[in-house]
Image (spheres, rainbow, N blue to C red):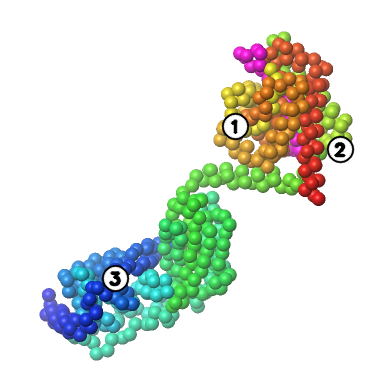
Amino acid sequence: MPERLKSFFLRLRLAGLLSILALPIHGTAAAETQQSTVSMLVSTGSGQGYSIKVQGVRDDSALLVDVGSMARALRLRSLFDGSQMQIDEGIATPGSSCILVQGSTFSLIVPAEGSTEKRMLQLSSAPLVRQGRLYLPVAQACRMFSLWLDRNLTYDISSGRIRASLSAPRRTGPSLRAVGLLPSEGAAEPAALPQPQSESQPDQPQSPATPKPSGQSVIEEVRVETLANGCVVRLVASGGQSEISYLRPDENGNAYLTIEKAAGSLPRLTKRYADGVVKSVTPLQLPGGALQFTVALNTAAISLKSSSFQYDPKTHDYLLYVMSDVDVEAIRRTEKERQIQQQLSHDMNKWKLDAVVIDAGHGGKDPGAIGTRGTKEKDVVLNIATDLGMFVKQRWPGVKVIYTRKDDRFIQLNERGKIANRYGGKLFVSIHCNSTPTVTKAKGTEVYILGPHKTQSALDVAMFENSVISREENARDNYKGFSDEYLIMSSMAQSAFATQSTELAQDVLRKAERYGSNGLGVRQAGFMVLWTPSMPSILVETGYLSNPEEEKILRSREQQAKIAFGIFQGLQQYRASYENRLMANER
């Protein structure tokens, strides 16, 4: 070791010994100390950072930090021999070392090899050794690291936190690299050490290489922009750019954004949100002029994937990006459901039954079920649909009747619902005949609403009625993606009418029971014909053509009219109940 450094260390150790001898007795009494920790919030640039605990002790009312623990928190290497600590800089290259000696009020900054510039920093309190650790008062430790590293390290007494900015460039104000600089010949102590700029006073900005907005950064507004897989919290700003630091969300979902030398209206910048990724944004003006934003994230509703914070030089805004770990396709489906739900629910209180859509199943090249005597479903249901429309026109003069087909033609399943929507239908009734290949005794009227099937027989009926798509052109494109998953989505999209559809089905089934019922009640299954209509919708299976007795009834023109009238009576019961409720709500 050079003789000059040996001389420095000898003087440091002597000053430390004298300081220890001068200490009051309670200063070294272990019984007077209490273990403690202090949070350090470290910004590393580009909106990144971390939070870490620094070890410490409380001596009476003073908080002392373990210098070695603080060095590790700053990602610096340190070595302590029981009385002397050397900390090696890892932030910059080439680095330097800071040497502290127990009891000495000076710390020596030794440059990297090849440099002759040495510095000595004066401390207002000498470091103490407790149980094998070297301690300094927290504010003094921050000041020492700031002077040595030329970085911003401050202790906020109100929050009890250390804030450290390790991002480049080093400081926005004058460099502190010259503080404590010794003459090249070397000296034990400088005659007068330059005092660092007060932490409470704004730094003087350096002359920028290119013109930039000047003055204090003022936060004008907080905006939350929702994305499919997260959100952007935008702090709309004016004035010059300030140094920023960001601490990622803690276990409670709270992220902390700190903008140095910034201001804004706290009441105007305070935000609360009923739903979404962000629950609230709360600003706090810190001592020294920094403006801190606590962003509370809804971690119960989202799985947080990543977050970052940066300054936008084009708009001069500060941006927090929050990305959630989600299935984007699922979000799009959910958004589609929400939009459909919103559209379906629009003006529901003003709904009036002024148009009924009657859908005669099958037709044209699709005969539907065929009975033992050759009875075709498409012919039976067309007659029932025509009769039902006649009853509606006779009994409800102000109600429009819309047929998906009025003759023997083939209509695609997805087109039937589109017809209902296109002409403003308020009820959709699809009429069919049932059939089973194995049980010839199956009989009775059944009424279905759209939904996931709950029984195998309900699935079988739906599969038979849906099988018509094999006769359609471009079926693969028309029904792409139809599955239980999309069926559930469709059911949810029609939730505005779910109660009405069920009530309609129950009313129709009760009136149809006089013509034969199997006691199965209202059922649900994935009928494609019910997938599209945006209104209360039911599918009526008027009887079983596979049952010879019911086939005889279904072939009869008289019985077909009776079945149609039974369906109409169910519609009439539903209409009366619904309109009575509307009148009661208007009173």
Magenta-drawn segment: 421-442
Q: Nearer the viewer, mark 2 or mark 3?
A: 3
- Residue at the image point whose x is 48% and y is 56% from the top: 322
- Decide whether residue 398 is among the magenta residues: no
Task: Give the distance between the C-alpha atoms of the residues marked 3 and 1, in whole angstroms.
Answer: 65 Å
Which is more toward the observer, 562 or 470? 562
Q: As displayed, is residue 192 above or below residue 327?
A: below
State the mark number for residue 452: 1
Element under disc 3: strand
- Which of 138/318 is in front? 138
Q: Position of residue 458 (x, y in %)?
A: 62, 25
Q: Can you say whether 301 is above or below 568 in the image? A: below
Q: Quadrant of residue 356?
A: top right
Quarter of the figure with residue 470: top right
Q: How many marks?
A: 3
Quadrant in which the N terminus appears? bottom left
Which label belongs to residue 398? 2
- At label 1, the amino acid type is Pro
Whichever of callouts 3 and 1 sits on the residue coming sooner in the sequence is 3
Q: Position of residue 425 (x, y in %)?
A: 76, 37
Looking at the rendered structure, the kind of residue marked 2 is Gly
Marks 2 and 3, the one that precedes in the sequence: 3
Q: Is residue 74 above or below residue 353?
A: below
Residue at x-position 57% and y-position 43%: 333
